[in-house]
């Protein structure tokens, strides 16, 4: 473990999250598109699934400033 990591573990975690953010955003967008195109309607009408999808859409809006 480097000195920097032991002194700044939260900053290191933040740096990793920032580096991964573009791939995470694109993956979430692709997942939502797949859900819209491929998943049967009865699955999408499940309240738990609906809540998860809404949180995913909210996260995308937050990350993009509302520009999907």
Image (cartoon, rainbow, N blue to C red):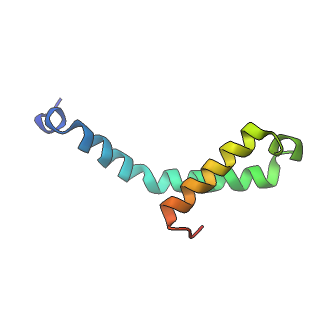
Q: Residue furthest bottom?
A: 67
Q: Is residue 14 above or below residue 57?
A: above
Q: Quadrant of the N terminus?
A: top left
Residue drawn at 68 percent across, 53 percent down? 32
State the image quarter where residue 46 is shown: top right
Residue 35 falls left or right of residue 66: right
Q: Residue furthest left?
A: 3
Number of numbered callouts drawn: 0
Residue 41 falls left or right of residue 50: right
State the image quarter where residue 67 is shown: bottom right
Residue 15 at least partly seen: yes
State the image quarter where residue 47 is shown: top right
Residue drawn at 78 percent across, 54 percent down? 36
Observer-nearest of 63 and 5: 63
Where in the figure is residue 19, as x and y percent of width and height?
37, 52
Q: Quadrant of the C terminus?
A: bottom right
Observer-nearest of 58 and 24: 58
Residue 62 falls left or right of residue 28: left
């Amino acid at each position: 473990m480097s000195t920097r990591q032991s002194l700044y573990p939260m900053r290191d975690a933040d740096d990793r999250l920032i580096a991964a953010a573009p791939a995470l955003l694109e993956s979430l967008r692709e997942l939502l598109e797949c859900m819209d195109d491929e998943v049967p309607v009865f699955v999408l009408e499940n309240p738990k699934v609906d809540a998860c999808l809404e949180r995913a859409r909210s996260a995308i809006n937050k990350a993009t400033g509302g520009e999907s």
